[in-house]
Amino acid sequence: MTLPTATLGRTGLRVSRLGYGAMELRGPEAWGPPVNDDEARTVLNEALDAGINLIDTSPDYGEAEEHIGRWISHRRDEFVLVGKCGCPVTGGDPAHVYTRANVRACVERSLRRMRTDHLDVLMVHLSPSVAVMEAEDTVAEMRALQDEGAIRFTGMSGELPHLPDHLAMGVFDVFLLPYSALDRSHEEFAGAAAAAGAGTIARGSVARSLVPPPEAVPEPIRRPLADRHARVAAARLDELADGVPVAELLLRYILGRPELHSLIVGSAQAAHLRANITAATKGPLPPDVHNAVHDRLHPE
């Protein structure tokens, strides 16, 4: 069986509905576990070999960009590469800055690290307000980078409360949105983005809810992850799984949402990647199972 695909909105890019999120390759410098070269090389190449052709990354993700450049830059024509801007490019202050200078610096460093001459999609990271972007001419610099061929399409890694304003701007070709079987708070906005012709990608969809978050994760991030883990445990989804991993239920639940063109799931372990691929090739859950998962995670 092959992975299902979809057209990423008006970009016209045909992408696998299961994408790969490179955050799990971040390593200790970005509060992640160590990732050795063999693990990174294996998981990235196996993803491409299986037909995953969308890879999402960021300058914030520690060693991830360097792994992509080192291990799969020679296969660059096989995948759609999604990067981020606004991220710190030097040590010290971790604040995100959306000035024209920093947008360009992010892109230039990402291109060097990943050994490529372009990003297919450049996303504004961490959902700044429209007022901030207008004050800093963020979008103008993205347009300049488009004109130069350094990026092909613009995007927003967005979330509430600013996401409705981002949609109203009408300038972003792709949206990366939080969406999972547990968190449907952005569902209407995913639908609105798709209806307006934008590409949509879901993030935070599966694995982080299955295990307690590491203590090393900063508390503002750790707290909601811990809550999601508790909700999944309380729902006893294993009773519905019929022998398959609960992660498969959660992944295939999202495949039942046609307004979401792709979902990114990351892992540094080839076994986890293979399990995700196996799940995705099965397509959406049967309607009765989909409804049962929904009812257990969202009891009235």
Image (tube, rainbow, N blue to C red):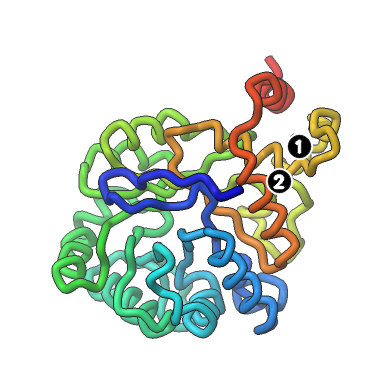
Residue extending furthest front?
1
Contact? badges 1 and 2 (CB < 8 Å): yes
Residue 104 location, x and y as percent? 26, 75
295 up-or-down from 67: above or below? above
Circle 1 crowding by C-alpha within 10 Å: few under 14, some 14–19, many from 20: many
* Marks 1 and 2, how far apart at CA: 7 Å
Residue 157 showing in the rendered view: yes
Residue 292 location, x and y as percent? 71, 21
Q: Residue at 67% of width from left, 45% of height from top?
A: 279
Q: Based on the displayed image, in which of its 4 quarters is residue 45 positioned? A: bottom right
Residue 226 as seen in the image, left or right of residue 254:
right
Q: Secondary structure at mark 1?
A: helix
User: Circle 2 is placed at which residue position?
Assistant: 209
Name the residue type under label 1. Answer: Val
Residue 177 location, x and y as percent? 46, 45
Name the residue type under label 2. Answer: Ser
Q: Residue at 68% of width from left, 62% of height from top?
A: 217
Residue 234 showing in the rendered view: no
Q: Residue at 20% of width from left, 72% of height from top?
A: 149
Q: Based on the displayed image, in which of its 4 quarters is residue 214 positioned? A: bottom right
Circle 2 crowding by C-alpha within 10 Å: few under 14, some 14–19, many from 20: many
User: Circle 1 is placed at which residue position?
Assistant: 232
Residue 161 as seen in the image, left or right of residue 223:
left
269 up-or-down from 211: above or below? below
60 up-or-down from 194: above or below? below
Residue 260 as seen in the image, left or right of residue 103:
right
Residue 53 as seen in the image, left or right of residue 112:
right
Q: Based on the displayed image, in which of its 4 quarters is residue 246 positioned? A: top right
Q: Secondary structure at mark 2?
A: helix
Q: Residue at 60% of width from left, 45% of height from top?
A: 205
Q: Quadrant of the C terminus?
A: top right
